Image (spheres, grey):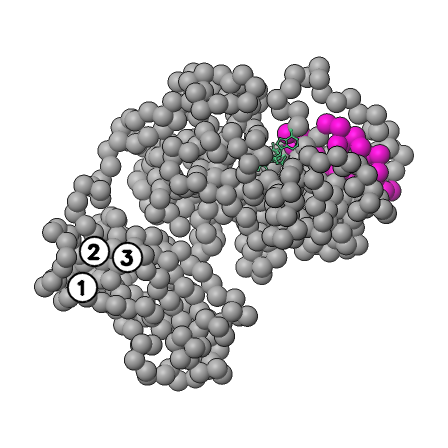
Amino acid sequence: MSLLYKRITLVVADIERSLTVYRDILGFTINYIQPSDKDSFSYPVFNIPKEADLNFATLDSPTQERTFALTEIKGVALPKQEGIHMSASVIKVDDLANVISQVKALGLHTTDVKTDENEYAEFIEQAFVDVDGHLIVLYQLMDKEFALASEMEQWVLAKRPVGLATVEDFHLVEVPIPNIEEGQALVKTLYLGVAPVMLRYMNNETEFERPLHIGDVMHGRGVGRVVESKCDAFKVGDIVQSKLRWREYAVIQDEPYYLTHTMHNTDLNLSYGVGALGMNGFTAVLGMRDICAVQPGDTVLVSGAAGSVGSMVGFIAKTLGAKTVIGIAGGEKKCRLLTEQLGYDAALDYKSPGLYEKIDKYLPEGIDVFFDNVGGELLDEVLGRINRRARIAICGRISEYLIPPEQYHRPRNLYRIGLKDAKMEGFFIYDYAKNHHEYEHQMAQWIREGKVKPYEDISVGIEHMPHALISLYQGTNGGTRMVRVDPSAH
Ligand code: NAP
């Protein structure tokens, strides 16, 4: 068998079943094509009759610069032109044995293949037939790059930060990948998120995270793939969100401390597990849908609107029927992001003068709902503008994380909570862990319907972790800031 395949599309009988192979085993990124885009994408390119009821997705290979397309055609006989009935694809993988074991677990038939000609000095290959009968040839190059890793990198705390963290507060060290014991699982980190609260971890200022000593691996949550397991709760291949910490491989246990969740919607981008389908997305749902209980016609104001949580809150408010949704962010660029990509009706720049006058101008009827990420003086000013039965969700108070308590703003307008029969509630997403899968289901549905459009800010390589964290305080991030630790992750 030759490796000289040039296949670009596979017509399949059942797109969801075929995606199981491409997405879950081979790690392809799936881009569903929206119905409105199908005309421009599929019909002319693949010569498919207009009357066909079509499901179409493109797949980006994690290992090579090639896009495959899967097309499911219903309602018409498949056209037989050259270029549509592609029947085989050749795919480079990093870990052939692992992929083949997953393929076998699906009950698919595998076979050894021999190649006559190839451009590589050394490689191994195997083939299997996917659920729709297409031959998929997998090959793995046998150079050093693909040898099984035995060492990994991790960031440890070098010293406590003074004010804002700096790169010098961390050390990147190389250590052996740990062995697991009974009851544990080894997870390969795919994505790590950063959050303002991490600065407080570095100073041991939170009650809910374990103490961080100098030399300890930095705390943090992320998304990873279980690669080894001696624990009933996690199977090899599971995609989990957990307290992985800042390291390339993590050992986790089935314990409440880790707040580990197995992701269900892995057809969507796995990076969403850090944002929209992770703690920040659920914070946005909890705050806007459950605590503020947005009603059709409400006027809504959101602070920290261009950050990870804020970038989803506006979409949710609109989806729930809010009449006007106004976001506050720092700088012109972020304000443009709010109105052009994050669903806000208008954006107010708190770094230019006259913020409170702008609030009056854009919300002349007063404020029904305030989702607050910032706290301090802004919260106080908003209290002065709330309507009867207003609802205020205290999500965060980032403006006061770096100052001592004696400098915290003392509110003057608290009395208006009683005066206006309003509600103001602080909340912490960890307390709602039991609702995790309901939040995931809700957000995944909104994403599929195009109602929530996750906005991500991704650096590639674990070496970027400190910069990613620092950017949250410098305001240079937009949406969910994260690091793709495994460059081949989708
Ligand atoms: P993020 O993505 O890190 O965004 C933070 C944004 O805050 C920055 O982009 C910056 O935007 C803004 N900011 C930074 N310093 C500020 C200051 N001094 N005054 C006003 N704004 C400032 O944040 P996130 O992850 O969305 O988190 C937002 C808030 O929610 C944080 O306070 C976090 O602690 C909290 N949170 C709470 C829960 C919960 O369970 N309650 C869960 C997750 C997060 P600008 O450039 O626009 O200033």
C-beta proximity under 8 Å, tags 1 and 2:
yes
Mark nearer the N terminus (2 vs 3): 3
Residue 125 place in picture, x, y as percent: 17, 56
Residue extending furthest toward the left: 116
Q: For the residue marked with disc 2, what is the amino acid? A: Tyr
> Quick check: can you spot residue 303?
yes
Residue 332 place in picture, x, y as percent: 64, 42
Q: Is disc 2's CB within 8 Å of ligand 1?
A: no
Which residue is rendered at x = 64% and y = 39% of the image? 331
Residue 148 place in picture, x, y as percent: 22, 40
2 vs 3, front mark: 2
In reply to whether residue 337 is colored magenta, the answer given is no
Q: Residues within 10 Å of mark 2 (few under 14, many from 20)?
A: many
Q: Which residue is mark 2?
A: 139
Mark seen at residue 374 = none
Looking at the rendered structure, the secondary structure element under dot 3 is helix
Question: Would you say 442 lies left or right of 412 here?
Answer: left
